[in-house]
Amino acid sequence: VGDLDNDGDFDLVVVHQNDPASLLRNRAARRPHVRLKLVGTRANRDAVGARVVLRNQPTQQVRLIKSGSGYFSHSDQRIVFSITSSEADVLVAWPGGECEIFRNLSPGQTQILVEGHGERDDFE
């Protein structure tokens, strides 16, 4: 599972036993979104265990960075949030315990958030 064509919605690759893999593309209408790739510098480079919260939107959305997703499978490590405004703020609670906020993220592109490069914040 992942945003394979970078359009903000999730696509699916299914690997069949003794048959070619299938790509199932989500062709729903594009929505404004923020796509995030987290890079850890202290606890682990892939930021596994980080908690990411989308703020300043009508509804708060929360995602967790995890590794793996099932038997012999793996999903996209990036996070995609649907947004309703032209910019978004994201709070990241890194695995090492530090909390940072990244402000004014623009939609429609992959934002790379590096641990230690955001504003320090108290997790609320």
Image (spheres, rainbow, N blue to C red):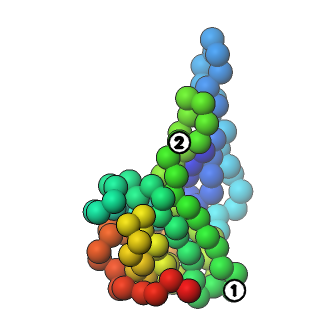
Of badges 1 and 2, nearer the viewer stands 2
Q: Tell me: residue 44, above or below residue 1.
A: below
What residue is drawn where x is 61% and y is 70%? Answer: 62
The answer to whether 113 appears left or right of 20 in the picture is left
Q: Tell me: residue 25, above or below residue 106.
A: above
Instruction: Please tell me whether mark 2 sits on a helix, a strand or a loop.
Output: loop
What residue is drawn where x is 28% and y is 63%? Answer: 41
Q: Can you give x and y, in whole percent of width and height, for residue 114 in the image?
A: 32, 68
Q: Tell me: residue 19, above or below residue 9.
A: above
- The kind of residue tagged 1 is Pro
The N terminus, quarter of image? top right
Q: Can you give x and y, in whole percent of width and height, for residue 64 in the image?
A: 56, 61
Q: Is residue 4 visible?
A: no
Label of residue 107 in the image: none
Label of residue 58 in the image: 1
Q: Tell me: residue 103, above or below residue 31.
A: below
What residue is drawn where x is 63% and y is 85%? Answer: 57
Label of residue 68 in the image: 2
Q: Is 87 in front, or is 69?
A: 69
What residue is drawn where x is 69% and y is 51%? Answer: 27
The C terminus, quarter of image? bottom right
Instruction: Please tell me whether mark 1 sits on a helix, a strand or a loop.
Output: loop
- The kind of residue tagged 2 is Gly
